[in-house]
Image (spheres, grey):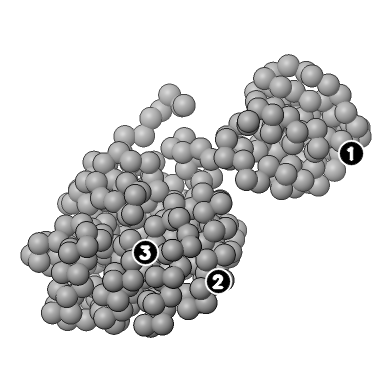
Amino acid sequence: MTDRQIKKRKSRRIYVGDIPIGDGAPVAVQSMTNTDTRDVSSTVAQIKRLEDAGCEIVRMAIPDEVAADALQRIKGKVKAPLIADIHFDYRLAIAAIKAGADGLRINPGNIGDRGKLEKVINEAGTRNIPIRIGVNSGSLQKDILDKYGHPTPEAMAESALEHIRIFEEMGFTNIKISMKSSNVLNTIAAYEILSDKTDYPFHLGVTEAGTLISGTVKNALGIGMLLHEGIGDTMRVSLSRDPVEEVKAAYEILRALDLRHRGPEIISCPTCGRTEIDLFSIVEAVEKGLQGITASPKVAVMGCVVNGPGEAREADVGIAGGRGQGVLFKKGEVVGKFPEEELAAVLIREVKKIAG
């Protein structure tokens, strides 16, 4: 643990399936399938991969009644709670609840008039199903957009507050809130504004963030800065990529803030002209060889004799290489010297030993 502890925003507790959200619970990691939900076998396979990566809540698109029916069959084959993502047709939300969805994500701005929304809320209330009110900068209510001229942070926060008021008037408070924009600073500001006005739990994300590198950077900044302020109860790293990569990136953000730790932390040098081993190949082999480990030892893969030995000594286990060979460290002590071609295998073996 670090000396600087993050003071979390106080939020009320809800549950998505058996996953606690808010009120001091660990920040829950979510992702969303990109398979056709109607293809049950492909969707189940992807959800199982997400579960193996540590995904705790899975969201799925429900574009029609066939997808709603498929949700019921999918649910019986996976462990993670399932959230049905609904747009435009309130009847699909009701069908998804009846099919066994553990939660809904709706944008009240496109779900229909108040009467249709009330039918969804009544069904969710009867079955104790939480609803995420999803405010998106690209689909704000016309009157709010006219008022502000653009999807500003203030406009997004006002939209969320208006939806919250409607839900509360209908007697429904089993909700969490998200306010997403592809603009990182607008996303941060919107959550900051709303954080002082309500205690409902927040789901964090930066929508349409982009590809692996640009998207990870945007999410790390947007989500990471909010989490550092103590804001956020669940999160999804949105990437144009295999959703398993979203989960990996989410845990790295949480690890960097010392909020949650899952899997080995690999410390590796960027290499320079002093490097005399094929460090890129070694670190790739180590990363691949340690997949599936949930324990979180610190692992160092260093390529030269300048900073390498010091970094390796600070890790639980590590190697420092040079001139076709390397030294293995465990808990700061040198335990052996090995040729370059054996370094990855030796390090993987030692990490697995201490990871149990």
- What residue is shown with label 2? 41
Res. 249 in view:
no
Q: Position of residue 284 (x, y in %)?
A: 75, 47
Sequence order check: which comes first, mark 2 or mark 1?
A: 2
- Work out how far the residue at label 2 is from the one at label 1, CA to CA, in angstroms: 41 Å
Tell me the mark number nearer the camera, choosing from 3 and 2: 2
Query: Is label 2 in a helix, a strand or a loop?
Result: helix
Residue at the image point whose x is 42% and y is 78% from the top: 67
- Answer yes or no: do the residues labelled 2 and 1 have beta carbons within 8 Å? no
Q: Which mark is residue 103?
A: none
- Work out how far the residue at label 1 is from the one at label 3, CA to CA, in angstroms: 46 Å
Q: Which amino acid does label 1 sit on?
A: Glu
- What residue is shown with label 3? 83
Foreground pick, 175 / 37: 37
Q: Where is residue 348 in the image (x, y as percent from the top left)?
A: 74, 36
Residue at the image point whose x is 16% and y is 57% from the top: 173
- What residue is shown with label 1? 341
Q: How crowded is mark 1: few (under 14 residues within 10 Å), some or many (20 or more)?
A: some
- Work out how far the residue at label 3 is from the one at label 2, CA to CA, in angstroms: 18 Å
Residue at the image point whose x is 78% and y is 18% from the top: 334
Q: Which amino acid does label 2 sit on?
A: Ser
Query: Is label 3 in a helix, a strand or a loop?
Result: strand
